[in-house]
Amino acid sequence: MSDVSPRRSPLASQGLQVTLGLIGGLALGMVLSQQATPSAFTGGLLATLEVIGTAWINAVRMTVIPLVVPLLIVGVAGGDDLRATGTVGAKAFGWMLVLLVACALFSSVASSVWFDALVLDPAATTRLRESAKIDVPSSDALSVRTFILSLIPLNPIKAAADGTLLPVVLFTLLYAFALGKVQDAPRGAQLAFFRGMADTMLIVVQWMLALGGIGIFALATVLGQKLGTNVLGAIGFYFVVNIVLHLVATAGIYVAVAFSGRVSVRDFARALVPASVVGMGSRSSLASLPAMVKGATDVLHLPPTATGFVLPLCASVFKLTSAVYWAIGALFIAKLYGIDLSTANLALVAASSVVLNFSTPGIPSGGMLLQVPLYASIGLPVEGIGILIALDTLPDMFKTLLNVTADMYVAVMTGNRSRGDDG
């Protein structure tokens, strides 16, 4: 009797676990939010779940730097032609730019039409405006000078310890290209070490993802309790526009995958399930990077240049969501404060979301705070950024979903499968 049976991908069961954890946690959290004053039991439960969820996210993020560094080194220095790797990088940035321009045009047109239908209650908007709080960083913290200098760390080890991925990626790329120039014997020894390290870290990632159902359930319960079911009025409208346009943009990427013919939509979705749910639960595309690499390797069978070079690069510098939510946020704040946002100013917001996408500062809410000078230049109140930050919890889940999907799409478009199967 044959022992051969269809081998089920471990990502399939993990994807189901984290999806059920997300749904179950949000549902439980919304039920708990109905208590006007949380009981001692509810408070203790939420505190415990917050610790569990945060610990799991920390465990996932713990694997990012030890996984990214060897993958980048092997992906660049392990190739036969360094110029070919440079070409892959150029193609990746080309696809990033295409997606940014397309999403900026789509969002500015769709959101402006949608916001024309919004009529706000003056009393409600007054309360919402009064709740705005924002600690605007110094102009130097958001300057081009600071951003450029931050890319060159005085101590790359400290940069890795601080979790600032982009400087680490740039240093690792420099090291990898230099390694590609040394003699075969020392280069081969280092590549063997880093291949072994990458393979080991992928096993660690698999262990972390195996606990994903518990971690996501804990995070989602706390999130659901904070959000509750009160998504009405101006806030509800903002949530709906933001979430729907992000979902449409995400669906558009799946359509582009179908037309590309490089991988099947089914495989693309299957490879993304764990990374997508981890990303939505943690609201961090960086935290979902290990799961993306795993899906791209195990399901899509993408080559090392895609899994070890393109995906870490995208997670470091590419935030497609900026091209969607910058226009939405500007229109919402304009409505909230009774300001007429001209077509020219909206076009400036859309263009800025593309041009400044790769320069998001490495500070909390950096993508939003980067808009402070922009808001001042087009006549929108800067304190409106504080409202957007306060309302970002729920939309940020769908922003991360779009970012993760876009990262995988760029990897697919810049690298062919290493095996010809469709499994």
Image (tube, rainbow, N blue to C red):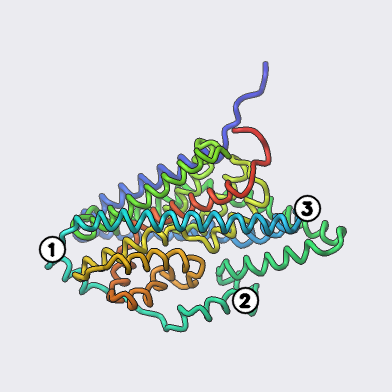
Q: Quadrant of residue 102?
A: bottom left
Q: Residue at x 45, y 41 (%)?
A: 255
The residue identified by callout 1 is 121
Instruction: Indicate left or right for 94 with 118 as reference.
Output: right
Task: Judge depth for marks 3 and 1 and give the one in front.
Answer: 3
Label tally:
3
N-terminal of the pair, mark 3 or mark 1, is 3
Q: Residues within 10 Å of mark 2 (few under 14, many from 20)?
A: some
Name of the residue lying farthest toward the top: 1
Instruction: Indicate left or right for 402 with 316 as reference.
Output: left
- Depth check: give the residue in front, 127 or 415: 415
Q: Residue at x 62, y 76 (%)?
A: 152
Name the secondary structure under disc 2: loop
The residue identified by callout 2 is 152
N-terminal of the pair, mark 2 or mark 3, is 3
Q: Residue at x 36, y 45 (%)?
A: 23
The residue identified by callout 3 is 80
Q: Position of residue 346 (x, y in %)?
A: 32, 65
Name the secondary structure under disc 3: loop
Q: Residue at x 66, y 34 (%)?
A: 420
N-terminal of the pair, mark 1 or mark 2, is 1
Identify the mark at residue 301; answer none if there is no mark. Answer: none
- Depth check: give the residue in front, 389 or 225: 389
